[in-house]
Amino acid sequence: MRFRRRKGRPRIPRFISEIPHIREFAPRVIDESGEGDDEIIKLTYEELEAIRLVDYLGFSQEEGAELMGISRRVFWDILKSARRKISDFLINGKVLKIEGGNYRLRECGICKLGGRMRHCVFKPKNHCRRFNQ
């Protein structure tokens, strides 16, 4: 069996700060009809990172794109997709799973613990000097 090559430019991995500990969310109240049990929305790690950078930490989209190592246009597409999935999860009561994607953990080299490199979690208060200049 032959495998087809993907046409065009290869997709570069997006940088994320961390993999979340909780990866699945479901509504507490389930409809009496039993609907919605099998409807699962998959949110990728880079979509969660885009939401975290812009909506939670308050970075601009330009700064978020720079932190993830992608263009502003790609960042906007990821952010728009993530917001659509999260609103569908909230409004329709579906199950949300966070998994997959094309990502790489960010290791800036400045944040060290015990001589071992660790990924930078980009706390808002000057946690990483490399990107907070």
Image (spheres, rainbow, N blue to C red):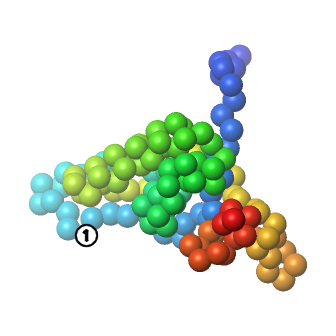
Q: Is residue 119 above or below residue 66?
A: below
Q: Position of residue 133 (x, y in %)?
A: 69, 65
Most foreground residue, 43 or 68? 68
Q: Residue at x 55, y 41 (%)?
A: 72
Which residue is labeled 1 in the image?
28
Say left or right for 121 vs 91.
right
Categorize mark 1 by other alpha carbons within 10 Å: few (<14), some (14-19), many (20+): few
Query: Extreme front residue here?
Result: 133
Query: Extreme bottom residue here?
Result: 114
Residue type at mark 1 is Arg
Q: Residue at x 42, y 61 (%)?
A: 55
Secondary structure at badge 1 equals loop
Q: Residue at x 47, y 42 (%)?
A: 76
Location of the N terminus by quadrant is top right
Say left or right for 4 vs 36.
right
Q: Where is residue 114 in the image (x, y as percent from the top left)?
A: 84, 83
| Residue 93 figure quarter | bottom left
Q: Where is residue 124 in the image (x, y as percent from the top left)?
A: 56, 73
Say left or right for 77 vs 93.
right
Q: Is residue 68 above or below residue 30?
A: above
Does residue 48 show up? no
Q: Residue at x 54, y 66 (%)?
A: 20
Q: Where is residue 120 in the image (x, y as percent from the top left)?
A: 69, 68
